[in-house]
Amino acid sequence: DFSDRLHTLSDIRTLVHTEKRLPKYVAVAEGVVAGFAIAYPFRPEPTFADTVKFTYWLQPSLTGRGIGTMLCNQLESECWQNGFRNVLVNISSENSGSIRFHERRGYVHCGRFKGVVTKMGRTFDMVWMQKELSNM
């Protein structure tokens, strides 16, 4: 997560309601918002029409329970059904758990922007990963 503050319920509502035509989900576990997952266009140009970008967030205390897998599976499936063929994600280089999660799901490294993120006084890289949905 590249935000320098905690997500509020208002932040999540804004993200969920911004993009109307692509899938988005909010997961609830134990009566609280466990996380969210959103697909949105990678770029507005028609030449990128079959590529989407995913954004996720999970409560740190609720990782490892299959919630992220469920959210990602649902996004990928719905995007595939709607004709999208490529998914991109960008991840903090410090989030090794997310990088491993995506590698296990068939995402491959496709880029790295060095030193472009500064959060809480620390500078780190942004890792880009890609998955082709053609094998679904």
Image (tube, rainbow, N blue to C red):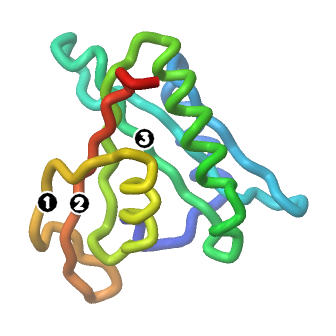
- Neighbour class for label 1 at 10 Å: few (<14), some, many (≥20)? some
Q: Amino acid at mark 2?
A: Val
Is 5 in front, or is 74? 74
- Neighbour class for label 2 at 10 Å: few (<14), some, many (≥20)? some
Q: Which mark is residue 127?
A: 2
Judging from the image, what secondary structure is the residue with disc 2 in? strand
Left or right position of 120 against 118:
right
Rendered residue at 41%/11% (across/down): 83
Q: Amino acid at mark 3?
A: Phe
Q: Can you give x and y, in whole percent of width and height, for residue 102 in the image?
A: 41, 54
Q: Which residue is mark 1?
A: 112
Counting labels gives 3
Instruction: Kindly check if marks 3 and 1 are in contact, taking CB atoms under 8 A apart as contact.
Output: no
Q: Residue furthest left?
A: 114
Rendered residue at 36%/63% (across/down): 99
Q: Which mark is residue 100?
A: none
Judging from the image, what secondary structure is the residue with disc 1 in? strand
Is 57 in front, or is 136? 136
Left or right position of 25 against 53:
right
**Vertical order, 40 against 4 (above or below):** above
Gap in angstroms between the C-alphas marked 3 and 1: 17 Å
Q: Which residue is mark 3?
A: 54
